[in-house]
Amino acid sequence: MTNSWADIGWTDLAIIMGGNAAEAHPCGFKWVVEAKANRGAKLIVVDPRYTRSASVADFYCPIRPGTDIAFLGGVINYLLSNDKIQHDYVKNYTNAAYLVNPAYGFSDGLFTGYDEAKRDYDKSSWDYQVGEDGFAKLDDTLQDPNCVFQLMKKHFAIYTPEMVERICGSPKDKFLKVAEMIASCSTPTKTMTSMYALGWTQHSKGSQNIRAMAMVQLLLGNIGVRGGGMNALRGHSNIQGLTDLGLMSNLIPGYLTLPTEKEPDFNAYMSSRGFKPLRPGQMSYWQNYKKFFVSFQKSMWGEAATAENNWAYDYLPKLDVTYDMLRVFDLMVQGKMTGYFCQGFNPLMTLSNRGKLTEGLSKLKWLVTMDPLDTETSRFWENHGEFNDVKTGDIQTEVFQLPTSCFAEDEGSLVNSGRWLQWHYPGQEPPGEAKLDTWIMAQIGQKLKALYQKEGGAFPDPILNLTWNYADPNNPTPQELAKEMNGSALADQMDPKDATKVVVEKGKQLSGFAQLKDDGSTQAFCWIYTGCWTEAGNQMARRDKEDGGTGLAPKWAWSWPANRRILYNRASSDVAGKPWDDSRKLVYWAGDKWAGIDVPDYGAAFKPEQTVGPFIMNPEGVARLFTRKMMRDGPFPTHYEPFEAPVANAVAPKIRGNPAARIFKGDFAALGSSDKYPYVATSYRLTEHFHQWTKHVWVNAVLQPEFFVEISEELAKEKGITKGGWVRVWSNRGSVKAKAVVTKRIKPLMVDGKPTHIVGIPQHWGFMGAAKKGMNPNSLTPFVGDANIETPEYKAFLVNIEAIASGPVA
Amino acid sequence: MIGELSRRQFLRTAGAGVAGTTLGAMGFGGAEQALAQSVRPFKLAKTTETRNTCPYCSVACGILMYGVGDGSANNKQAIMHIEGDPDHPVNRGTLCPKGAALLDFVHSDTRLKYPMHRKPGSDKFERVTWEFALERIARLMKDDRDKNFVAKSKDGVTVNRWTTVGFLAASATTNETATLTYKVVRSAGIVAFDNQARV
Ligand code: SF4
């Protein structure tokens, strides 16, 4: 989230598209209800199903799964053609005026530089025209045909209301009503908030779905303001934290990136991370990258990271490719993985194409699971009839099932969707011999280290020299670890203005990331968390909720970065520093300094006349409507069909799926076509269940005991399916049996002139737990991910359906 | 203290959680809820209150956990009631059907209690000691790392990566667990590293 939950109470218009907050985030959705009750705010829901969010919306518009970019492209076209944009914001705070290389172009659904064999682009033309002074060139009149504004107009012109209806199946009049409501927020005093979740991410172009809405929000001037923003509702309770902390193949904590093998040494690594400003006087905050990186290396390897060895640069692995989950399971199937750990993660029931997952796990030599619950993944080798039809004796994988604590037994912080780090306390001991995850990880780390100490072996240095300053090396405490995330001074830190004055003494906790150094005199595991545990104590445990009704709660817990509650908040005021909306002041120029209710996302010393842009992380100082070379699949979002679609791409008929998304050969062959699989399937969550966990919980198992699929009355009639009757649903990869729930909530849509049926498949069952054994959409879904971040295409694929006499045999 | 009392008094009149709501929906509401509400103040009187957050979705509602037992050897702490934290600025005491049933998650029949081991080809899990499991896991890691560690790429670039063992991190563990996990995993050179952000 750029903003936070209670801030939604300050919006004028909430749009829920790509999510279903009323059911999946109920206690957060409450803030939409507050906005409606207190401010007369409106709610729009755009969704393939008439969800509970839709049931309380002021306006609902249906959409075919996987066509959000066409819809949002239609909105962008509407805003531009009807001049419904916030001009001052667009001109000053976005790159609309920037001139793009004339070699850049777009035709037949492809940007310049496409290489079909590689499914990748040569992106060299996707950039600005740069002058001799090294700065990007601008046309402030926005008239130059190569300026971003004109290119954008041209790019989105194709998404007329008729085209939206043809692609999305959203009736033209309903689409226009949505566009009109959105356009009403183009004035500086009306604000829209975008609330989305996996409904946008789980597509082969998920990142571009989100970008498309971010562009809408920028055109409306809704980023950095109260009641606005791009609000990823996020899924699990600490998925924000695990991502912040870089627990992904290519990340270092705080959104730094691991080197690739094209960066053989530290200089090569830093050369592409210099972030020189692209306009005069811009802050380009990533210029401090080296400070964050060196402080991380010092945190990891202490005295072993020195200036001489480039801060132990070679201790970090260098990537040849990104080892995301999809790739790793593919490598398992190829027999190239030996062992796998699953910590609180149940991939057998959650990643795509279950048949392939079982095959992969069966080829491992060993598997370790750590979980409070008895997961399907840990029992993938056990035969459960049709629910897990495996030949146990043939599976040679050695499995360790390690019992862990659950939330009620551990202490520490979780990051909510609004980036708040909230501390919690244990209320009981783990049951039986179950242990804290920290204890387990410490044992594994210490035992591996002991083996290397004793026997030597492959490059032991990063293991042997790993910082491990815990009072009990076998049991690091959450307090010790939290302080480590924050970071401390390794030498006295002097005042930059007065060299005789010590600001932070050696050994003391740092109070903010501005104190980090690139000379090895500071350490911080995760720079964006610096400030969470200072000399003043644990800021994450703060519990003063008083905020005068602003919803920001600045003294409750601690939010990254720097306890800032709304990102880009400098953009809540105009160039002169005057709030766009006096009734929703956030950060503004008070004549001699920046004032307001939030920590300014800006340099304290800047005066408005310096025209330093509000998007201080970007070298431009402004937000990007055109993303240059930063996305694999294009600098503008463009409509691509899902890899399995009921129709050809209406704007580029020859292109299947997202042309820049990676898809492995076997998985491409496993795609189904609409002649055999005529129905569009989508997965979703129920309000009574959370992922695969609550089927272990008796109350929730009673509330929603059994797997089902949801179809329209029309499809039921066509296929002779009765309410509550058994059906078989199958894709080109697998098959499930379920009870049929026949509803009015899903209706066939007219897509490209033909009726298109949608099958809804909830994601909550398995063969372990208190609920009835059931199947899951992941038996059906394709093994392909988003072009940029490899989130599997879970929300739009093709299936067939038939009535059957009876259900599965356990 | 007075604030505490008044809040508890207030809570007595609040709804009886998700099970009560369901009973209400089935038409037995009045009697069951009245019973639940008259019992509760007595139940909570001797408990310890601990603040936590709901581990499910990232609204991260504040919760209060009520436990009995003082943690001594013969009097283990056990949580016997969970409800929304009325002081929390986001949920303000409310919980959804998931959070309202958290108690049954904590005490679920399928909570794991002992380290288990499945031998290749076997059709069952067998209970093992932590020592056995952890020693063996470390051994398996070491053997594979020594065998498959890639120190240099084909072009002679130092890459120091280990690609044949992977680690999937969770989505609900604490930042502190994540920090320790990152340190152990990355220092070993593991690159097949991911979390549940994608699914
Ligand atoms: S109670 Fe419901 S809304 Fe609140 S955090 Fe838990 S799952 Fe999310």
Image (cartoon, coloured by chain):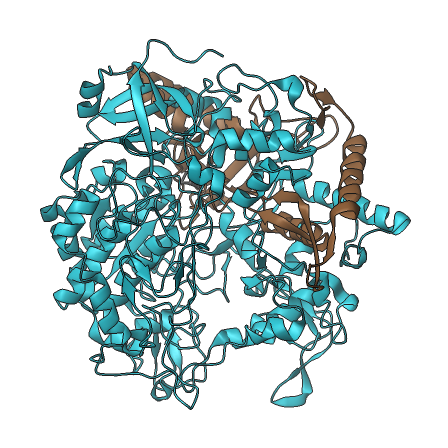
Chain colours: A cyan, B brown
Tell me the quadrant of ligand 1.
top left
- Nearest the eye: B162 or A600: B162
Residue A454 seen from this side: yes
Q: Position of residue A618 (x, y in %)?
A: 43, 73
- Residue A12 appears in the figure: no
Q: Is residue A805 above or below residue A715?
A: above
Residue A547 drawn above or below residue A18: below
Q: Residue furthest right?
A: A454
Q: Toward the viewer: A531 or A14?
A: A14
In the rendered image, the residue lying farthest to the top is: A805
Residue found at the far front of this picture: A117
Count of labels in the image? 0
The answer to whether A212 is drawn above or below residue A771 in the figure is below
Q: Is residue B99 left or right of residue A551?
A: right
Q: Quadrant of residue A125?
A: bottom left
**Residue B23 image offset from top left, x and y in percent:** 35, 19
- Indicate the position of residue A465 as horizontal and vertical percent values: 79, 59
Q: Where's the N terminus of chain A, which quadrant?
A: bottom left
Observer-nearest residue: A574 or A681? A681
Q: Quadrant of residue A225?
A: bottom left
Q: Residue at x 23, y 45 (%)?
A: A45
Would residue B4 be found to the left or right of residue A406 on screen? left
User: In the image, is residue A800 above or below residue A407?
Assistant: above
Residue A802 location in percent, x, y?
Answer: 29, 18
